[in-house]
Amino acid sequence: MRLGLVTYNIARNWDIETIIKLLEAAKWEAVELRTTHAHGVEPSLSPQEREKVRDRFLRSKVRLLSLGTACEYHSPDPSVVRRNIEETASFVDLAHDLGCWGIKVRPNRLLEDVPWRVTLQQIGEALQECGDIGARKGVEIWVEVHGRGTQNPIHMRTIMDVCSHPSVGICWNSNPGEVINGSIKEPFELLRPFIKNVHINRLASDYPYRELFGLLRSSGYERYCLAEVAESKEPERFLQYYRALWNELNRNRA
């Protein structure tokens, strides 16, 4: 496994040069660029601008791994769902042009006035269509375990069973609510077949990160863990300390 950064929120005000400079110095290996942030990597980029971004990362030691979108598919309004699928397609095109492995999308919530089974079915079917879009471009769709109600691992499993697309997988999000008696083994096993990406956050917390990293290793996960953390007044020092703690928690003690 390798360590990378989600630019939400610590790097929200960094440009691409700053991202690369700080991550290289701290020996981080990848980045997921979040939409709406100061680095400005959006579907509106021209072909020439896309080539420039791709080339800059290729000349660095930091992999431009993925794009973090806010695309979601829970709305009861079909036109809103369609607009989000179209936006997903535009990010897939961008990810393809930049050489990214995947894009992050999300469910955002269950609706009080709609049966939850209906919403989960709708999200899964929308993701199936997104999976087709991504497959044509060689870009995976990573569905964050996110949202009020939808972040329940049981509901996420339902979404993935409905979707059933090889290009669509789970982005494990390290949510405190999935910890059962100090362990995440049960929800992890429920979602393990679908995990294609991992978001981690504050390592110095009650979340059982050592167990998570052990479970990932034992499942054969050889991808990235991306830190999604708050802004820091001392980012250079924070990145170094975070990596040191990551190395310790990720150490195989078998």
Image (cartoon, grey):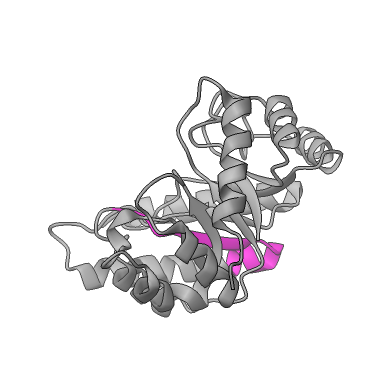
In the image, is residue 52 above or below residue 172? above
Q: How many marks?
A: 0
**In magenta segment, residue 143:** yes
Q: Quadrant of the C terminus?
A: bottom right
- Depth check: give the residue in front, 109 or 29: 29
Residue 227: x %, y % from top left: 53, 45
Residue 217: x %, y % from top left: 59, 71
Residue 34: x %, y % from top left: 54, 39
Question: Which residue does the image show at 51% across and 20% down from the upper left?
Answer: 233
Q: Quadrant of residue 111?
A: bottom left
Does 73 sit left or right of 40 as displayed?
left
Residue 166: x %, y % from top left: 58, 76
Q: Quadrant of residue 45?
A: top right
- Depth check: give the residue in front, 112 or 211: 211
Does 42 sit left or right of 129 as displayed?
right
Q: Is residue 245 visible?
A: yes
Q: Is residue 6 visible?
A: no
Q: Which residues are magenta?
A: 132-147
- Depth check: give the residue in front, 189 or 103: 189
Does 214 sit left or right of 135 as displayed?
left
Question: Which residue does the image show at 40% across and 70% down from the upper left?
Answer: 124
**Outermost residue toward the front in this view:** 253
**Outermost residue toward the right in this view:** 59
